[in-house]
Image (tube, rainbow, N blue to C red):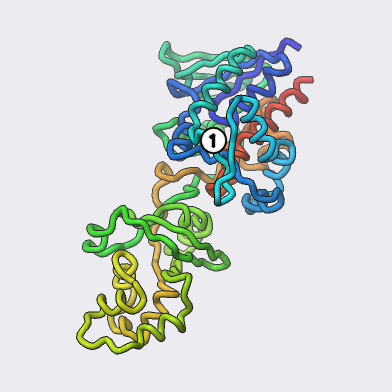
Amino acid sequence: MNKTVAIVGGGPAGLMAAEVLSKQGMNVDVYDAMPSLGRKFLMAGKSGLNLTHSEPFDQFVARYGDRKTEVETWLREFTPDDLREWALELGIETFVGTSGRVFPKGMKASPLLRAWIKRLSASGVTFHLRHKLTGILTDGSLRFDTSDGELTQKADAVILALGGGSWRRLGSDGEWVHWLRQAGVKVEALRPANCGFDVKWSPVFREKYEGHPIKAVILSFGEFHQQGEFIITKEGVEGSLVYAASSMLRDEISAKGTAVIQLDLAPDRTEAQLAERLSKPRGSRSMASHLEKTVGMKGVKASLLREFVPKEEFTEERLAFFIKHLPVTLIATRPLDEAISSAGGVSFDALNENLMLKNLPGVFCAGEMLDWEAPTGGYLITACFASGRRAGMSVLEWLR
């Protein structure tokens, strides 16, 4: 079957679709706006590529929240274990870390990407870099801006894997939203996911503690309760514990203007234990010295108490409560371009069960540009791979 498939986007979803199709003898052209492939994938692996997670499958798919049903169909066809096996075929061994996260043994993304591109090239995939898609014409042709001017290309089928709206400098600029909507495709607004939040710090706190980690705390918000750590930023807070709750916090801020989280600054002690120790005679010691001497509360954690405990309640009798239930008000979500990933995108209402756009036959979508989101921990990358595979298989079925 001598058919041509154009794939736009050289991240995990687009490259996985290319692999599926090239194995079946398709003529595959991959177009990417950047000078090299997989830039966001490489950035994700800069501090250690978290490829997937080892938790049980039912627990794994529950991480996709409202989109569990849709994402699960991709993941049943390409599971986290399948992803590890696929990496091994490329010569990349993986291991399970203490948190259950799965990493390449070398920790880096670049060896995997290099081996993958080499295999795709050997299978006949052609790569076209610095080709930015600017629209789909009425006859299904793709219009690109290139270094040589405007280019129009036609293929028997198209897979769009254009990414979300975060990390613009790496290629995920979300500019496709405008022209897809013009083509009649329902696209939900792109929003930050796995993002930080603004907090109204005092100037003194900001100057002293910007960049400091807050370790061994429990963050609570509604039904969410999780222990971990986060970082104080100039504008507010960010880090793995904040990211884990970010979708709920973002939606709360969108609905009500602010979101109030509660921090337990001493998860290993009860409020009663803290109260008993704080009740010891202070003598001539300052309150700061008393906090450190009795319950070991010092540095950034002690200063957090000063930031958010009302002055009249900063007493030995009330501090145990606030150490266990410190309210911190988040006043805004950090901008989309700073987020690790994005929510929103092509609505599942605009797609059939095979990820083909209903009003653009022969055009399929995959990856982060679809309207789903996932927490950090390997869930986002795994589902991008799986959706790319699903799109590739769907193109094969459609062309046949």
**Residue 285 versus residue 61 in the image, above or below:** below
**Toward the viewer: 92 or 210?**
92
Image quadrant where one finds the C terminus = top right
**Residue 359 versus residue 56 in the image, above or below:** above
Task: Identify the secondary structure beneath mark 1.
Answer: loop
Which residue is label 1 attached to? Answer: 105
Residue 192 is left or right of residue 51, and the answer is left
Residue 301 is left or right of residue 205, and the answer is right
Residue 171 is left or right of residue 392, and the answer is left
As shown in the figure, which amino acid type bears the numbered disc 1? Lys
- Where is residue 103 shown, x and y percent of the image? 55, 39
**Toward the viewer: 77 or 181?**
77
Residue that appears at 45% across and 66% down: 261
Q: Name, please, the residue furthest toward the right.
A: 400
Crowd rating for badge 1 (residues with CA inside 10 Å; few <14, some 14–19, many 20+): few
* Residue 375 visible, this orientation: yes
Q: Quadrant of residue 232?
A: bottom left
- Where is residue 326 shown, x and y percent of the image? 41, 72
* Residue 175 visible, this orientation: no
- Where is residue 200 shown, x and y percent of the image? 31, 62
Residue that appears at 27% across and 86% down: 282
**Residue 377 versus residue 328 in the image, above or below:** above
Image quadrant where one finds the N terminus = top right
Q: How many marks?
A: 1
**Residue 124 versus residue 366 in the image, above or below:** above
- Where is residue 126 shown, x and y percent of the image? 57, 13
Residue that appears at 49% across and 36% down: 107
